[in-house]
Amino acid sequence: MQDILNKLSDSEDNEIIRQVVEGNVDAFEFLLTKYKNHVVNLVAKHLPYHHVEETAQEVFIRAYRSLPTFKAISGFKPWLSSIALRTCYDFWRAHYRSRELPVSSLSEKHREWLETVISDSSNRSYYDQGSRKEARELMDWALEKLSAEDRMVLELVYLEGLTVKEVAKLLGWSAANVKVRSFRSRKKLRKLLSGLSDKEVIV
């Protein structure tokens, strides 16, 4: 039943996209209304609250401009999700700022969780490693000290539990690049945990 509903939804989206591409720009309002909450929720997972609304708007602007390149076979929602994640990635590339926060400020539970994650060779989701609250607090601390690329890989692989293949498709990277980033990110986190200075963490 769900597959049927998805096909109906895709067909509806494709018709709207066809109208927009052919000049009926007002029809895009339908897609904006239909997927606004989806985009806002997705962006909110990766950006500070006060940047969510503006970034969500940017996602739809990019989507509108890219509609002529949309391939119906992929489905509009996954395509839009990919644009949203790449927009988040671009946000961190443009606005990245590091914050001074000593390792000693981390609780023992945070340390234990991080040690588990960086030693985990199976790339399991953080849901299998500890509590959601501890994971989110720890990752917020660590992500501020890494590059935009590492941030996105860690969030998607460890916080959302996506596979390497899924992350590669969403970000438009090769699977090899995602694997390398994942390995390097864990290595950097290990350095952070060991109390090395920020200058020793390669970004």
Image (tube, helix red, strand yellow):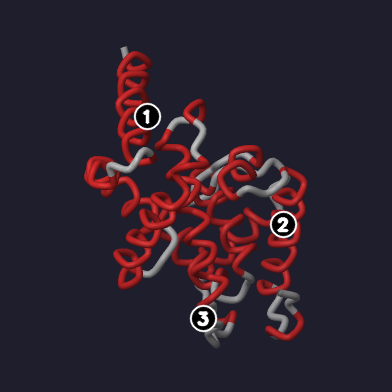
Residue located beneath label 3 in the image: 105
| Relative side of 40 to 174, left or right | left
The amino acid pointed to by label 3 is Ser
Separation of disc 1 and disc 2 at Cα?
Answer: 35 Å
Which amino acid is tagged 2?
Arg
- Between the residue at mark 3 and the residue at mark 2, the CA separation in whole angstroms equals 26 Å
For the residues labelled 3 and 1, the Cα–Cα distance comes to 51 Å
Q: Which badge, 1 or 2, comes first in the chain's sequence? A: 1
Give the residue at mark 1. 14
Q: Where residue 147 sits: x, y (%)?
A: 63, 71
State which tag comes first along the sequence, 3 or 2.
3
Q: What's the amino acid at mark 1?
A: Asn
Residue 181 marker: 2
Within 10 Å of disc 3 (Cα), the crowding (few <14, some 14-19, many 20+) is few
Seen from the viewer's position, the closer of residues 86 and 20 is: 20
Quadrant of the snapshot with the N terminus: top left
Quadrant (top left, top right, bottom left, bottom right) of the C terminus:
bottom right
Specify few, some or many for label 2: CA neighbours under 10 Å numbering under 14, 14-19, or 20 or more.
some
Of 17 and 167, nearer the camera is 17
Regarding residue 34, the answer to whether it shows in the image is no
Name the residue at the front extreme.
23
Q: Is the residue 52 above or below the residue 74 in the image? A: below
